[in-house]
Image (cartoon, helix red, strand yellow):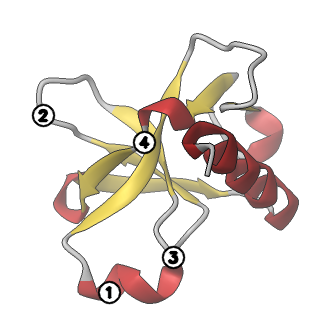
Amino acid sequence: MRGEVWWAELPDQKRRPVLIMTRTEAIPVLHALIAAPATRTIRPIPTHLRVGPDDGMPEECAFTFDNLTLVSKTSLTSRLCTLAPHRLLEACRAVDAALDC
């Protein structure tokens, strides 16, 4: 479901949380989903969404929307949390800033 944060085992990368951004209706029929990876490098820029324990994350980090990626559903190993609706709206603003369209 859109707005969920999952641990992902990505090829050639360490295990990391990703925020699912694919629209919920499309998820059942797709093999790969659009996701924003988490990073410990937190920058005060409009394309980063800072999250932490209050959001259900294990530690302070940021989702980086400049690095949106396709993630195979088979690489998602376990769900960490679901962002609150107001936080998902902030994520959508970060996508808008990253794509500038």
Q: Position of residue 60 (x, y in %)?
A: 70, 22
Q: Earlier in the sequence, mark 4 or mark 3?
A: 3
Tell me the element at label 3: loop
- Residue occupying image coordinates x 52% and y 60%: 21
Q: Residue furthest right?
A: 86
Q: Which mark is residue 68?
A: 4
Marks 4 and 3, how far apart at CA:
14 Å
- Distance from label 3 to label 2 (Cα)? 24 Å
On the image, numbered disc 1 is attached to which residue? 28
Estimate the x, y position of residue 5 in percent, counting from the top left: 53, 52
Between circles 2 and 4, the one closer to the viewer is 4
Quarter of image, res 61: top right
Outermost front residue: 101
Q: Earlier in the sequence, mark 4 or mark 1?
A: 1
* 3 or 2: tag closer to the N-terminus: 2
Instruction: Please identify, in this view, whether the residue under mark 3 or under mark 2 is nearer the observer.
Output: 3
Above or below: residue 23 compared with residue 95 = below
Of discs 3 and 1, which sits in the foreground? 3
The residue pinned by badge 2 equals 11
The mark that comes first in sequence, 2 or 4, is: 2
Of marks 3 and 1, which one's residue comes earlier in the chain? 3
- Whether residue 59 is visible: no
The residues bearing labels 3 and 1 have C-alpha atoms spaced at a distance of 10 Å
Tag shown at residue 23: 3
- Callouts 3 and 1 close, C-beta under 8 Å: no
